[in-house]
């Protein structure tokens, strides 16, 4: 078996070559959200990482600015978020048995991906857009503490802060 890596996603402010998702148009620009979404989809679907890139291949006169785009600065946040859990134990929730409602369809831009640790000690669920989901807590070994991770600011907050019920 060999590890999978998302070798290349879009580059910030680079035009789309095709209509890749329902919310994109040919010629539309890659945004930090779309790039971040691809990285988290890959990580929660079994990939061991992704390669962040820029439009630098064009060697434009503003190359120094190009190296400072938001997606390059935020790329390490994926690792920071996954280091908070036993990410090496994660297995994609492909059936799905962990997220049982609210995950959308695979071809939609708001698709939810999830991965559960082999020992059922932790899980990661990536929501591409705000919405309500149902999580099967019986899939976990022991008590569950849910928290939100903001992939832009690298901050955690209690899930009860967002959903007090």
Image (cartoon, helix red, strand yellow):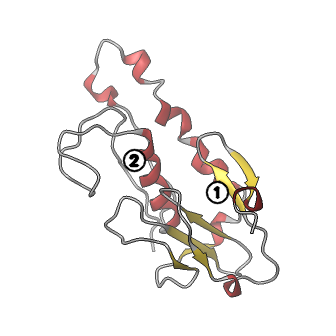
Q: Which residue is painted at 47% across and 63% down in the image?
A: 47
- In this view, which residue lies farthest toward the top? 61
Which secondary structure lies at badge 1?
Answer: helix
Quarter that holds the C terminus: bottom right
Q: CA distance from mark 1 to mark 2?
A: 19 Å
x then y, percent, for residue 82: 64, 57
Taking the image as shown, residue 154 lies to the left or right of residue 105, namely right
Quarter that holds the N terminus: bottom left
Q: Which residue in the protein does label 2 denote?
A: 34
- In this view, which residue lies farthest toward the bottom? 138
Q: Which residue is painted at 50% across and 55% down in the image?
A: 49
- In this view, which residue lies farthest toward the front? 165
- How packed is label 1: few (under 14 Cα within 10 Å), some, or many (20 or more)? some
Which secondary structure lies at badge 2?
Answer: helix
- How packed is label 2: few (under 14 Cα within 10 Å), some, or many (20 or more)? some
Q: Which mark is residue 82?
A: 1
């Amino acid at each position: 078996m060999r590890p999978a890596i998302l070798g290349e996603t879009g580059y910030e402010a680079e035009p789309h070559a095709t209509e890749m998702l329902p919310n994109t148009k040919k010629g539309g620009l890659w945004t930090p959200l779309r790039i971040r979404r691809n990285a988290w989809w890959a990580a929660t679907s079994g990939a061991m990482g992704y390669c962040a890139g820029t439009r630098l291949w064009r060697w434009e006169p503003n190359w120094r600015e190009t190296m400072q785009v938001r997606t390059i600065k935020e790329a390490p946040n994926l690792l920071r978020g996954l280091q908070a859990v036993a990410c090496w134990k994660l297995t994609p929730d492909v059936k799905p048995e962990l997220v049982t409602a609210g995950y959308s369809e695979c071809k939609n831009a708001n698709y939810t991906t999830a991965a559960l640790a082999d020992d059922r000690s932790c899980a990661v669920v990536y929501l591409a857009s705000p919405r309500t989901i149902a999580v099967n807590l019986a899939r976990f070994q022991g008590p569950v503490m849910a928290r939100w991770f903001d992939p832009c600011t690298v901050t955690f907050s209690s899930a009860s802060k967002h959903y007090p019920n």
